[in-house]
C-alpha cells in the first residue's frame, strides 16, 4: 500500500469527488456561472482539507452541463490552494489524451502540490470527447487499454521506448518532470461491472470503483473479481488499494436527506442523461444495506462501516455536489463529515 | 400525455397503413393527446454502436429522443423470417436497458401468414419486458388478406385497432395515477 501512499493503520480514507457538472439548481432553475462553479470547486477542496478529509478529486467530461474539461488545470489551482489533502482526477479520460502530455501535466501538479497528486484513468461513459478531440469511437476499448498501459509505463520509468497503434512511437524518450516521489499512484476507473474490474486486477493496478446505487452486496462481486484476477496474475491483492465512489448526503434525518438531495439528482440526471432517477430506487437508497450514503450522520457512519466490512476497501469518495447543489448545503455537509462522520469512521477502521 | 406510434419497418406498406389508421384512431378518440408518428422509412438511422442515445447525431437522436420522451408507445411491425425486422430491433438496441420504464407499450403486427401469430407473444414481449415496459397484453394481428389497395378492408381489424388504442391510453393514464399516488407517499 505504501507505493500508493496509503497507510492502513490510519483507517479508511475519506474523500470528495466532483464530476465538475454545471447544472441549474432545480428549485430556482438558475445556474451559477462557469467561473463561479470553478471557484466553488476550488473552495470546496479547501473546506475539505480544513475539515480533515483525506482526498479531493475532479472529473473530466466533455458533455454539455459540465465545466471541468480542463480538469488538470483545475487541479493545478487546487494544488496551490491546499497544503495537505491528496488530490486526483476522477477520471482522466486517457483514451482521448496523449499519455505523455497527461503525465507531464500530472507530474507538474504533483510538484506544485508537493507530492499529493494521483491519477484515476477512465474510458468515459459518454463519448462527446471522441468527436471533439478527434478519435474514432470504434477504437473505444483499444484506445483506453493501449494508452492506459503507456501511462503506467511512463510512470514506472523515466526513459521510455514504446511502440503502439494509436500514438507515435517513443524512442528512449525522457518524460519529465518526474513526480516528487518518482511515480504517481495511478488507478483504473471501474464503472461497477466485474468485467472491467478483472482488467484492473490482471494489470495489478489499484481500482477506483464508482457505483450509482443498489445493494452494497452487489458491488462485492466486483471487488472479489478484482482481487481474484490480481491473485491469478501473480499480484498480491493485499498490496492493491480499492476505492469506492458514490452519492453522499448527510442531514438531520434520512427523510431530510432524501428531500434535500432527490430533486438535484433527478433533474440533473434528466438533463445530462435523458432519464431521471426513479423515486422507488432512490427511496431504497436510505436502506442501511444500500450503497448510497444518504441519511443522518449516524446512519451514514453505519453504512460506511458496513461497506468497509464487505469490501475491505482503503478509500471512500463521496459525491455530493451533483445537480446544482447550493454551496451552503455543501458546507453544511463538510461540517457534518468533519465533526461527526470522519472521527467515527477512523476510530472503527484504523488498524 | 405524449403518444408515439412507431412503424418499425422500411419495407412494404402494410404496417404503415395500419399505423396511419392507429394515428387516426387516437385523434378520433383522444383529440387532446399529443401524438407523433415515426415511420422508420422516413429516417436515416444508424446501427447501434453502444453509445448513449443522446450522443448520436441527427435522425438517430431525433427518433430515440422522441421515443424516450413518450408516455405511451404503439409499435407496429411486420414479421420477417419469423421475427421482428432488424430495423425495429435496432431501435431497441439504441436505447438504454430500462428505456420503457413507466411507459405503456401496445403492439400490432402485420404478417403474410397466420403461422406468425405468436411471434409478438414470444419475441417482442420478452424484449419489452426486459426494457421495463408496461405491456398491453392483447395485441392486434393483421393478415395480408385484410389489406387491399393500401387500405384495411376488414372492419373487425379496425375495431381491434380502436380497442388497442383505447387499452393503451387507459392503461397509461391508470399507470400514471398509480405511480403518482405511490410517489406521493414518499414525501421527498
Image: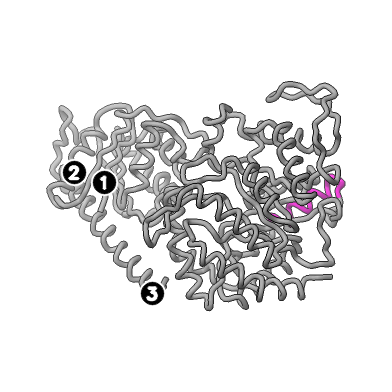
Q: Indicate which label's residue lies in the foreground, 2 or 3.
A: 3
Let me know if residue A195 appears in the view.
Answer: no
- Dot 2 falls on a residue whose secondary structure is helix
User: In screen coordinates, is B135 left or right of A300?
Assistant: left
Sequence-wise, the earlier of marks 2 and 1 is 1
> Are the numbered discs 2 and 3 placed on the same chain, yes or no?
yes
Q: Report the span colored magenta.
A: A222-235
Q: Position of residue A147 (x, y in %)?
A: 71, 33
The image's colour scheme reads one colour
Residue in view at x 52 percent, y 78 percent: A253
* Quadrant assignment, res B179: bottom left
Q: Position of residue A65 (x, y in %)?
A: 47, 46
Q: Which residue is mark 1?
A: B140
Q: Which residue is mark 2?
A: B157
Mark 3 Cα-neighbour bin, 10 Å: few <14, some 14–19, many ≥20: few
User: In screen coordinates, is B164 left or right of B64?
Assistant: left
> Are the numbered discs 3 and 1 placed on the same chain, yes or no?
yes
Q: Position of residue B141 (x, y in %)?
A: 27, 43
Which chain is disc 1 placed on? B
- Dot 3 falls on a residue whose secondary structure is loop
Residue in view at x 40 percent, y 74 percent: B187
Residue in view at x 20 percent, y 37 percent: B20
* Quadrant assignment, res A174: top right
Amino acid at each position: 500500500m505504501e507505493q500508493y501512499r496509503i497507510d492502513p493503520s490510519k483507517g479508511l480514507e475519506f474523500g470528495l469527488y466532483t464530476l465538475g457538472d454545471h447544472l441549474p439548481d432545480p428549485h430556482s432553475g438558475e445556474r451559477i456561472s462557469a467561473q463561479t462553479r470553478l471557484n466553488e470547486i476550488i473552495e470546496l477542496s479547501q473546506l475539505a482539507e480544513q475539515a480533515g478529509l483525506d482526498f479531493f478529486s475532479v472529473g473530466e467530461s466533455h458533455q454539455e452541463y459540465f465545466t471541468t474539461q480542463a480538469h488538470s488545470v483545475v487541479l493545478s489551482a487546487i494544488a496551490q490552494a491546499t497544503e495537505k489533502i491528496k488530490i486526483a482526477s476522477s477520471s482522466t479520460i486517457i483514451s482521448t489524451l496523449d499519455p505523455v502530455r497527461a503525465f507531464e501535466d500530472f507530474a507538474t501538479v504533483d510538484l506544485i502540490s508537493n507530492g499529493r497528486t494521483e491519477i484515476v484513468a477512465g474510458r468515459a461513459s459518454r463519448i462527446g470527447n471522441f468527436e471533439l478531440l478527434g478519435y474514432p469511437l470504434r477504437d473505444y476499448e483499444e484506445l483506453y487499454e493501449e494508452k492506459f498501459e503507456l501511462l503506467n509505463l511512463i510512470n514506472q520509468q523515466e526513459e521510455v521506448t514504446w511502440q503502439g497503434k494509436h500514438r507515435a512511437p517513443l524512442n528512449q524518450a525522457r518524460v519529465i518532470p518526474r513526480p516528487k516521489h518518482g511515480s504517481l499512484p495511478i488507478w483504473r476507473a471501474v464503472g461497477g461491472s466485474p468485467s472491467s474490474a478483472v482488467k484492473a486486477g490482471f494489470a495489478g493496478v489499484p481500482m477506483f470503483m464508482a457505483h450509482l446505487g443498489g445493494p452494497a452486496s452487489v458491488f462485492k462481486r466486483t471487488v472479489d473479481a478484482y482481487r481474484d484476477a490480481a491473485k491469478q496474475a501473480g499480484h498480491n491483492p493485499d498490496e492493491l488499494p480499492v476505492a469506492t465512489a458514490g452519492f453522499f448526503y448527510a442531514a438531520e434525518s434520512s427523510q431530510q436527506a432524501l428531500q434535500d438531495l432527490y430533486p438535484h439528482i433527478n433533474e440533473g440526471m434528466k438533463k445530462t442523461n435523458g432519464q431521471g432517477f426513479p423515486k422507488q430506487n432512490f427511496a431504497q437508497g436510505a436502506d442501511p444495506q444500500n450503497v448510497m450514503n444518504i441519511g443522518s450522520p449516524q446512519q451514514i457512519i453505519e453504512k460506511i462501516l458496513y461497506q468497509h466490512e464487505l469490501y475491505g476497501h482503503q478509500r471512500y469518495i463521496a459525491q455530493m455536489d451533483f445537480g446544482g447543489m447550493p454551496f451552503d448545503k455543501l458546507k453544511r455537509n463538510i461540517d457534518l463529515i468533519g465533526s461527526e462522520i470522519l472521527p467515527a469512521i477512523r476510530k472503527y477502521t484504523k488498524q | 400525455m405524449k403518444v408515439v406510434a412507431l412503424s418499425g419497418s422500411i419495407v412494404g406498406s402494410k404496417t404503415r397503413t395500419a399505423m396511419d389508421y392507429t394515428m387516426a384512431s387516437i385523434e378520433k378518440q383522444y383529440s387532446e393527446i399529443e401524438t407523433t408518428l415515426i415511420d422508420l422509412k422516413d429516417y436515416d438511422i444508424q446501427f447501434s454502436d453502444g453509445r448513449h442515445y443522446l450522443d448520436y447525431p441527427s435522425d438517430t437522436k431525433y427518433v430515440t429522443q422522441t421515443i424516450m420522451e413518450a408516455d405511451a408507445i404503439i409499435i407496429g411491425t411486420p414479421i420477417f423470417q419469423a421475427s421482428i425486422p432488424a430495423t425495429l430491433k435496432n431501435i431497441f438496441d439504441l436505447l438504454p436497458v430500462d428505456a420503457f420504464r413507466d411507459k405503456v407499450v401496445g403492439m400490432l403486427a402485420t404478417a403474410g401468414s397466420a403461422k406468425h401469430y405468436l411471434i409478438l407473444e414470444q419475441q417482442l414481449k420478452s424484449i419489452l419486458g426486459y426494457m421495463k415496459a408496461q405491456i398491453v397484453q392483447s395485441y392486434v394481428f393483421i393478415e395480408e388478406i385484410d389489406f387491399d389497395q393500401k387500405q384495411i378492408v376488414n372492419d373487425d381489424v379496425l375495431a381491434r385497432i380502436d380497442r388497442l388504442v383505447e387499452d393503451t391510453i387507459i392503461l397509461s393514464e391508470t399507470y400514471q395515477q398509480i405511480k403518482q399516488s405511490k410517489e406521493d407517499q414518499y414525501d421527498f
